[in-house]
Amino acid sequence: MQPATDDIDWSAVLLRVRDSRDNAAFAALFRHFAPRVKAFLMKSGADATLAEECAQDVMATLWHKAHLYDPARASVATWIFTIARNRRIDALRRARRPEPEDLTWGPDHEPDQADVLAQRQDSARLGAALTQLPPKQRELIEQAYFGDRTHTEIAAATGLPLGTIKSRIRLALDRLRHELK
């Protein structure tokens, strides 16, 4: 007889996935959380197809990034649903980007030289302001804005908590705003 899902210590199950790549533990997590993630995504406005794709992606992320789970920081459900929320946001962002066939083709109009000069000067000022940032903040700004990575992707790549990533980027943007006034 299977234990009721309320009686299962999901942290212990995820730790088995994290520490020993336990397939049975992952299957239990998948059976329990995949339908709940899909329902959560559908309640947040995703259609069934997108919700299914995101749920699959969330569960694949759980398998591949189980090493990032820290039971002292969040429950398994919180960790999984945060991943799901972020995947939904990423999917919405992708949906808003124009498709290549929607982009205009052909030669662009020649820009006004005053605008070109102003843009170069602004770029130079921004470059100088970026060099004034502490290295940790500058690296995060470069990854977020020049590398086009989400905060979640940066957190996964650096191993830093998501809150730290957001705080450092916010501080860096405040410094840049102040420098560029």
Image (cartoon, rainbow, N blue to C red):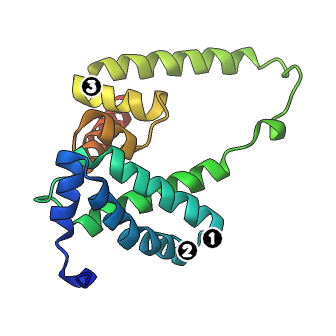
Question: Would you call the spot at circle 2 few (<14 residues within 10 Å), some (14-19), or many (20 or more)?
Answer: some
118 up-or-down from 13: above or below: above
Query: Element at badge 2?
Result: helix
Lateral position of residue 178 relative to residue 50, left or right: left
Residue 103, given in percent of the width and then of the height, sits at 80, 36
Q: Residue at x 23, y 28 (%)?
A: 136
User: Measured from the top left, where is residue 53 in percent x and y?
Assistant: 57, 58
Question: Residue 133, how many percent across, how many down?
Answer: 26, 25
CB-based contact (under 8 Å), mark 1 and mark 2: yes
The label number, if any, that marks residue 48 in the structure image: 1
The quadrant of the image that shows the C terminus is: top left
Q: Is residue 123 left or right of residue 136?
A: right
Image point (43%, 75%), residue name? 36
Looking at numbered disc 2 in the image, what kind of residue is underneath it?
Met
Answer with mark 2 or mark 3, whichever residue precedes in sequence: 2
Q: Of marks 1 and 2, which one's residue comes earlier in the chain?
A: 2
Disc number placed over residue 42 in the picture, else none: 2
Mark 1 or 2: the one toward you: 1
Amino acid type, label 3: Leu
Residue 126: tell me if it is visible. Answer: yes
User: Residue shown at 42%/51% (left/top)?
Assistant: 60
Q: Nearer the viewer, residue 134 or 78?
A: 78
What residue does disc 3 label? 133
